[in-house]
Amino acid sequence: MSYQNTFILVSPDCPATNGIVPVSAKETKPVHLIQYELLTEYPYKYDYPELLFETHIRHKQISAEELGRRGQEIRDELFAKKHACLRASALPKKYGWGVHYEEVGKIAIYGVDSLEYKQLSESNGSGVQILHGMRSRKA
């Protein structure tokens, strides 16, 4: 699901008190680490479908050659299935990152301890919809 003018707060049961950089010892990076890298290196570059596709390419380690040959087919296969929105990502659920969608749906993330997070979380009434990340456990 893609949003516009929306800020997703960290989940109510998020254990992080600051934005934590995800790490992984696995050979293949997990999706949340790829999302973190893309959204911190290129804030407001990707909308949700673009982020999903770029994350998929990197997670599955699809080569540029294969992408050139089968890019549309890979995209069609990916989007033929439903995908959870960033409210369900480990970034707001576990690592303390709020997710901001600006007016055209481009995305950036901000640590829960940052000034930007504070400003965005208090911007309700200025046209920015405020949502919480999804809980990891039932309340």
Image: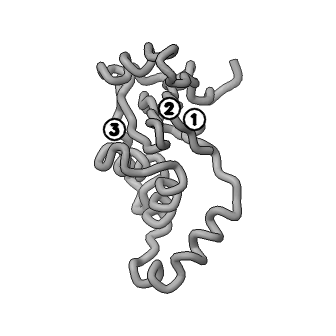
Horizontal side of residue 68 vs 80, given as left or right: left
Task: Categorize mark 1 by other alpha carbons within 10 Å: few (<14), some (14-19), many (20+).
Answer: many
Q: What number of labels is visible?
A: 3
Image height check: is 73 above or below 60? below
**Residue on which disc 2 sits:** 5
**Residue on which disc 1 sits:** 87
Q: What distance separates the C-alpha of mark 3 from that of mark 2? A: 25 Å
**Residue on which disc 3 sits:** 21
Hey, which quadrant is residue 49 in on the image?
Answer: bottom right
Which comes before the other along the chain, label 1 or label 2? 2
- Please tell me the numbered disc located at residue 49: none
Q: Amino acid at mark 3?
A: Val
Q: Amino acid at mark 2?
A: Asn
Task: Categorize mark 2 by other alpha carbons within 10 Å: few (<14), some (14-19), many (20+).
Answer: some
Q: Nearer the viewer, residue 61 or 68?
A: 68
Q: What distance separates the C-alpha of mark 1 from that of mark 3? A: 18 Å
Image height check: is 62 above or below 101? below
Which comes before the other along the chain, label 1 or label 3? 3
Whole-percent x, y for residue 52 in the image:
52, 55
